[in-house]
Image (spheres, rainbow, N blue to C red):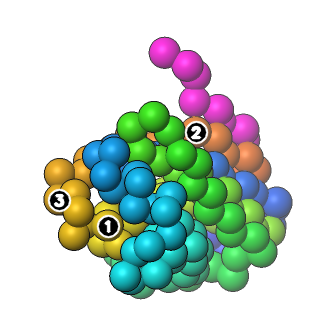
Amino acid sequence: MVDVGDKDVTDREAIARGSIAMSATARKLIKGGNNKKGDPIQAARLAGIMAAKKTSELIPLCHPLTLSHVSVDLTPTRSGYAIESRVRISGKTGVEMEALTAVAVAALTLYDMVKAVDKAMVIGDIELVEKKGGRSGHYRKSKV
């Protein structure tokens, strides 16, 4: 584990995004609110938030952190859902892994909630799009 003892406490934020592509049948099931397992969007949002808080238990050598904010938003697209996580802390280490983990687990939860109608869903494009704070400063992914 990296020693962060000498680092300054700064406000830090990370934003990650990803996506899940699915069939029209799966999208209809989610939108219709008739899923036997409950509301897939709310379950995925909650799972993403919980995952961000548990990142150090999932990723080896990741520091356990007391997060000040975690949000996970799922937005319908033509082919499925876009997922975005925003994580903040005032601390000695960044929250990129927490934001990425939130997106990944939200996508996996959405998959689990509707896999009965679509096992061919594709989770992808999970990436850090922005981070602020810390020694390395501000990073924003450039558009390609």
Q: Amino acid at mark 3?
A: Lys
Please state the horizontal and vertical placement of residue 136, each as a whole percent of the image: 66, 43
| In-front residue for pair 49/134 | 49
Query: What residue sits right under mark 3 in the picture?
Result: 119
- Examine the rendered structure and indicate whether residue 12 appears above or below residue 68: above
- The quarter of the picture where residue 96 lies is bottom right
Q: Amino acid at mark 2?
A: Val
Q: Residue at x 53, y 51 (%)?
A: 83
| In-front residue for pair 13/119 | 119
Q: Residue at x 69, y 82 (%)?
A: 66
Q: Residue at x 29, y 46 (%)?
A: 23
Q: Of callouts 2 and 1, which one flags the residue occurring earlier in the amino acid sequence?
A: 1
Between marks 2 and 1, how big is the CA–CA gap? 27 Å
Please state the horizontal and vertical placement of residue 134, each as a whole percent of the image: 72, 52
Q: Residue at x 49, y 62 (%)?
A: 32
Q: Of callouts 1 and 3, which one flags the residue occurring earlier in the amino acid sequence?
A: 1
| In-front residue for pair 46/8 | 46
Between marks 1 and 3, how big is the CA–CA gap? 8 Å
Q: Nearer the viewer, mark 2 or mark 1?
A: 1
Mark 1 neighbour density, 10 Å: few (under 14) some (14–19) many (20 or more)? many
- Examine the rendered structure and indicate whether residue 133 appears above or below residue 141: below
Between marks 2 and 3, how big is the CA–CA gap? 28 Å
Residue extending furthest toward the top: 144
Direction from residue 126 to residue 111 in the image, left or right: left
Label 2 sits on a secondary structure element that is strand
Query: What residue sits right under mark 1 in the picture?
Result: 114
Residue stretch rendered in magenta on the structure: 137-144
Q: How many marks?
A: 3
Q: Which of the image's four quarters has the N terminus?
A: bottom left
Query: What residue sits right under mark 2 in the picture?
Result: 129
